Image: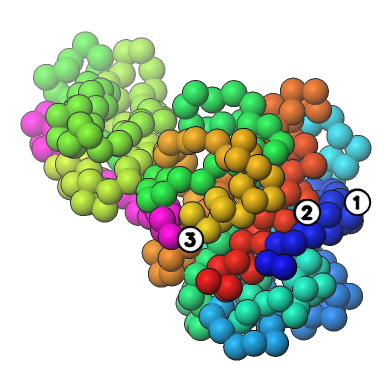
Amino acid sequence: MSAGDGIVTSAEALSGQLTEWRRHLHEHPELSFQEHETTDFLERTLRGFGVDPVRKTETGLWFDIEGPRSGRTVLVRADIDALPIEEEADVPYRSGRPGVMHACGHDGHTAIALGVTKLLLERRGEIAGRVRVLFQPAEEKLPGGAPMMIRAGVLEGVDEAIGLHLMPMRLWAPGGVFPVGRAALIDGPAMAAAEEFRIRIRGVGGHGAAPHTAVDAIACATQVVNALQHIVSRQVDPLQPAVVTVGTFHAGYNFNVIAPQAELTGTVRAFDESVRDRMEESLRRIVRQTADAFGATADIEYIRGYPPLVNAAEQAEVVRGVIRDLYGTDALEAAVPMMGAEDFAYILQERPGAFLWLGCGSEELKAAYANHHPKFAIDERALPIGAAVLTAAALRLLER
Ligand SMILES: [Zn+2]
Ligand SMILES: [Zn+2]
């Protein structure tokens, strides 16, 4: 017998329950840092299992499942928050809260972690150490729930960490539906760091016929937009992935008025910490000096978001081994890093671990929209797979 025997069967037997939990959560979504009902639901459900949660933050909780032998501790993390999106998916368990939707699959992650808890409680005798299960709030909103839970002590005594993300569509090339039964897990940097910037260019307003009496904020801001594209093309190592996107540009009052002010917002993405530093420096310099060159001034707000998510090769290989053993070699798909971001990255900065992408797409079930789409949906057959993989991975990490 090795850790993992019979887990697929036990997880399949939990399918109905996993679906029920997930649908309940889907109907009752809550925004980041406001997951009170979700936390109450988790506490009630866990008490029903005989588990006493250690509640450490206003929303979110964690607890330990101890095996008979002493050993290391593995953290299994699920995020629990929803997004400010009006649901357009045509399902009977549609969001009951206007403007709030589980459009990133965190309802599924939460149900999976409840499943992991159940499966581990059934196999307490096989746990060579301790598994800590974390239900983490606020993945979707800066500054993120993960750093808050770390400050609350969730990593004290933890040696390694694992987690997963449900994905109906491949967010990496070549794209397309990422079906149930498939998973991907790459070594090293897997998801990008994501920053947010706001730039306000201040010129001097005036009559459209008298430019010499004014400082045109639009003329200046367009130069800034173009110059910012030189950061990636001319200032970052071409072998390093990087993105600068200006997402909004607002300025002006009327056709015959010179705009006194222009406001730009956007995002910067990169993997490497030194590239991240360099891009912030470049952006600040380009904005300041371009404004100066045109006689304008600029205010820059630059918010560092989540760090890059970096999988540890050793733990990633253990998880891949579990997937191969439970679901066959074909279940594992080759993937490349993506420019999306994820706050589990903070946990992986502190402890070695692995973050897995789990397929849950199906054209037939209309689960063929990317995460954050208002029609986002999942093929729920992915839930027992997620629970089996995380349970077996936690057991195997402790066994080695
Ligand atoms: Zn998301
Ligand atoms: Zn997510």
Task: Tell me if 102 is positioned left or right of 348 in this view.
Answer: right
Quote the CA–CA distance across marks 3 and 2: 21 Å
- In the rendered image, the quadrant that contains the N terminus is bottom right
Residue 36 horizontal/vertical position (percent): 74, 67
- Is residue 292 visible in this depiction of the protein? yes
Identify the secondary structure beneath mark 3. Answer: helix
- List the residue tagged with mark 1: 16
Query: In the rendered structure, which disc, 3 or 2, sits on the residue that comes first in sequence?
Result: 2
Element type at mark 1: helix
Picture layout, residue 245 above or below residue 82 = above
Residue 8 is tagged as: 2
Secondary structure at numbered mark 2: helix
Local crowd size for mark 3, using a 10 Å CA cut-off: few (<14), some (14–19), many (≥20): many
Frontmost of labels 3 and 1 is 3
Q: Is residue 297 visible?
A: no
Task: Tell me residue 70's x, y (percent).
Answer: 60, 88
In the rendered structure, which amino acid carries the disc numbered 2? Val
Whichever of labels 2 and 1 marks the residue nearer the N terminus, that label is: 2
Residue sitting nearer the eye, 195 or 361? 361
Whether the residues at callouts 3 and 1 have beta carbons within 8 Å, the answer is no
Q: Position of residue 395 (x, y in %)?
A: 64, 69
- State the residue at coordinates (38%, 50%): 188
Q: Are marks 3 and 2 in contact (CB under 8 Å)?
A: no
Considering every residue shown, the one lying at the far left of the view is: 293
- Residue 227 position (above or below residue 85): above
Q: Nearer the viewer, residue 226 or 236?
A: 236
Distance from the alpha carbon under mark 2 to that under mark 1: 14 Å
Q: Which mark is residue 315?
A: 3
The stretch in magenta equals 286-315
Residue 350 lies left or right of residue 54; in this view the side is left
